[in-house]
Image (cartoon, grey):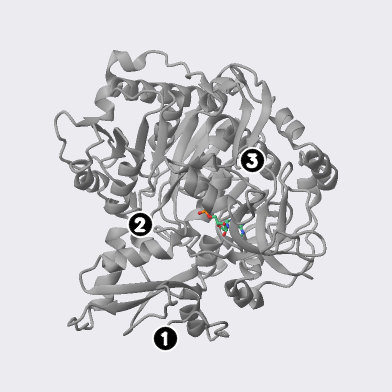
Amino acid sequence: MSETVQAEKATLPSEEAVLYPPPAHVLERARVKSYEELYKESIENPEAYWEAEARELEWFKPWERVLDWQAPFARWFVGAECNITHNCLDRHVKTWRKNKLGLIWESESGETRTYSYFSMHREVCRFANVLKSLGVHKGDRVTIYMPRIPEQVFAILACARIGAIHSVVFGGFSVEALFDRIQDAESRVLITADGGFMNGKMVPLKSMVDQVAGRSPCLESVLVVRRTGEPVAMEAGRDYWYHDLAELPISQRPCPAESLDSEHPLFILYTSGTTGRPKGIVHVHGGYMVQVYTTLKNVFDLDDEDRYWCTADAGWVTGHSYIVYGPLLMGATMFMYEGAPTFPYPDRWWRLVARYGITVLYSTPTAIRGLMRFGEAWPDRHDLSSLRLLGSVGEPINPEAWRWYHRVIGKERCPIMDTWWQTETGGFMISPTPCVPLKPGTATRPLFGIEVDVVDDRGQSVEPGQDGLLVIKKPWPGMLRTLYKNPELYKEVYWSRFEGRYYSAGDSARKDKDGYIWVVGRVDDVIKVSGYRLGTAEVESALVSHPAVAEAACIGKPHPVKGNSIKAFVVFVAGFTPDDNTSEELREHVGKELGKIARPDEIDFVSGLPKTRSGKIMRRLLKAQELGLPIGDTSTLED
Ligand code: WT7
């Protein structure tokens, strides 16, 4: 077992924690009343379980086989044809849900917009027609770089509707990160907006796009949604206003959802890993649709009375699965908020919960910890009694934050669904359903049809209470199909550790005597900063791209709000003398290369880095030293 696992052991909350049984009002309406039975059944025959779930959705052509597993490559619902947007929109428009509110949106400055299922269907068809008029075809990649506005959702769905593959780049990412992702996906079209708003400030998205569009040979058109109304440069023949094209009669025509093979790619989403460059995770229409639908249904028990709010940005997988696709597959009413949680005051979220009568709130430990700092008076000013369930995702939630969330926000009547999953898994994997008794700090048990385990280096299950590696033992419908243009790397990163038998998640975990799974943290060179996933290699190469830096190493350090913060160690090129501004300059440089979230909190100037004899930086030594932990084995140290 690696030392990283050992080192973090002490911080894991007590497994003897008190159980929080489900309150009667939650249990009463829970779809799943008994976890054990259904779980057992689903694991005895996972294909039958998933097949029954798939039957709740509509398919243009039925499958011949549920699963074709040529490890580690899976095909689910083989031979079937479907389109995820048909199930998100058309399926509901045929029923009374046509007039149901699908989306309620509020901007930071307080504007609101609402859409029924009928009007969302219209918007998406129109958007899809505009994409077609720009020459976007089935299989083409489209990059989306948008603020958090309804059109972000419509743009995503519009791509899916015509079988184009969307690659959403979070609006907070830098120009360089956007550039890399456009190149890797070879996108022909980029969808953006003139700008967005965050924290009272305007984010000039279009002018950022202008810095990459000119040097991206694959890019033919830039489609611009008007959001801020600020003047922007439009290059004739390349840049188009969305509202101009949307007005054309050709855009008003019906746009039936393309009938697609269930394995047709739905999206690429880039995420950080051990390797230097972000990896393009590929998800497909059929299996992903089934998993996202089933998991949201079981975990958040959404029904027609609900008003569901996931606070993520649609630019992350949480937003893809549980803002865009999941709630619409369920025919639910969702709420979307454009701005910062503290704008203009730290009670903005609680104000929104009260104003819109939110029943299910799905957020992150880092946001909870951040809002906790402002004290209870802020939430206490608002009526939060509409809430029924709370959710958490992104990193382990520490019991202190869990209890605050449970007591102050949920008034001790809302169970917290701590959902463990990854960009790669497509949907929830380990999570309570509302009937499962909770312990603060654990995502509890695997969901139905999902077989997970905690194993040692040889792949043997470890005893309860022992640390090990988190693995998934059987394929699941929402699993990534490959890494874009790199199936070899897919095999190596996820399946090589146990010779193709198990999927390794890259997390360490421990199972307790009740079978609850406690995720400890990453075992690879990934750092979770405020729940965002960053690779040490990415941050290091951003630092090294600064002319003064010869070498760099980064580690994650526990942080009270962010979970982890980045500490960097840099070696300067010969002859460079740092001054008082150097640290800040390097931080800004990383911000420009990768995005603000990647900026190191601390930078130490050092004369050399600890390396193995083969020249690999030993980050664990830096970490052990920094945190005052045992240094461990140094036999491979060069010097
Ligand atoms: C990594 C995946 C999937 C949505 C957002 C993150 C960590 C995620 C939990 C949780 C403990 C968690 C893991 C995982 N993680 N949720 N509930 N408890 N850890 O997606 O960026 O792909 O990151 O986030 O370390 O491997 P992601």
Please give the residue where the numbered disc 3 appears in the rendered image: 296
Q: Is residue 529 visible?
A: no
Name the spot of residue 335 as percent of width and height, x first.
51, 41
Amino acid type of disc 1? Asp
Q: Earlier in the sequence, mark 3 or mark 1?
A: 3
Q: Quadrant of residue 427?
A: top right
Helix, strand or loop for disc 3: helix
Amino acid type of disc 3? Leu
Please give the residue where the numbered disc 2 appears in the rendered image: 199
Name the spot of residue 155 as percent of width and height, x first.
39, 32
Q: CA distance from mark 3 to mark 2?
A: 30 Å
Figure quadrant of the C terminus: bottom left
Q: Is residue 309 visible?
A: yes
Q: Earlier in the sequence, mark 2 or mark 1?
A: 2
Nearest-to-viewer mark from 3 and 2 = 3
- Camera-nearest residue between 106 and 332: 332
Q: Is residue 175 above or below residue 146?
A: below
Pointer 2 local density, CA inside 10 Å: few below 14, some 14–19, many at least 20: some
What number of labels is visible? 3
Amino acid type of disc 2? Asn
Please give the residue where the numbered disc 1 appears in the rendered image: 639
Pointer 1 local density, CA inside 10 Å: few below 14, some 14–19, many at least 20: few
Q: Earlier in the sequence, mark 3 or mark 2?
A: 2
Helix, strand or loop for disc 1: loop
Q: Is mark 1 within 8 Å of ligand 1?
A: no
Q: Is residue 461 above or below residue 296?
A: below
**Left or right: 234 in relation to 496:** left
Pointer 3 local density, CA inside 10 Å: few below 14, some 14–19, many at least 20: many
Name the spot of residue 503 as percent of width and height, x first.
62, 50
